[in-house]
Image (cartoon, rainbow, N blue to C red):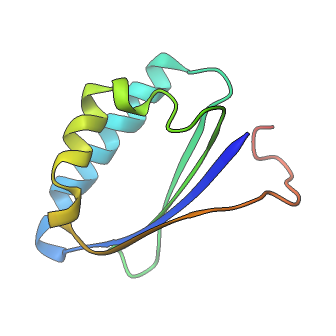
Amino acid sequence: METLLITYRVRSDRLDEHLTLLDAVHRDLTRLRPPGFRYLTLRLDDGLSFVDVVIGPDLPGPLPSLESFGRFRAGLEERCEQRSTTEFTVLGSYGMGE
């Protein structure tokens, strides 16, 4: 199982656009329900910072095949002030959809 932690901060003038694009990705994943794939987005208290947790076999999994994800990724660098991606290992988990 591969894991990714993606942190980023969206420019305030692009927030509404970002939320719309992100919602479309989550709706498509909910509709498709890819087996073994997990994609969690957290919005931090400042309202502009986000954390995505992606878990699944053979990442990036189904994301590249989603038209909504293509639209989301197309302007991501311009929408964000900062962004980083890190692999991680789950040491323990309770109730997180294992």
Q: Note whether 84 is above or below 87 in the view shown.
A: below
Q: Which image quarter holds the C terminus? A: top right
Residue 61 lies, in percent from the top left, at 52, 31
Q: Note whether 97 is above or below 19 in the view shown.
A: above
Tell how many labels: 0
Residue at x-position 18% and y-position 59%: 16
In the picture as drawn, the residue positioned furthest to the left comes out as 13
Q: Which image quarter holds the N terminus? A: top right
Residue 90 lies, in percent from the top left, at 80, 57
Residue 12 lies, in percent from the top left, at 18, 75
Along the viewing direction, whichever of 13 and 58 lies nearer the viewer = 58
In the picture as drawn, the residue positioned furthest to the bottom comes out as 46
Along the viewing direction, whichever of 26 and 87 lies nearer the viewer = 87
Q: Would residue 7 be found to the left or right of residue 11 on screen?
A: right
Residue at x-position 48% and y-position 17%: 32
Residue at x-position 35% and y-position 23%: 65
Q: Would residue 49 be found to the left or right of residue 14 on screen?
A: right
Residue 40 lies, in percent from the top left, at 55, 49
Q: Note whether 70 is above or below 87 in the view shown.
A: above
Q: Would residue 33 be found to the left or right of residue 82 on screen?
A: right
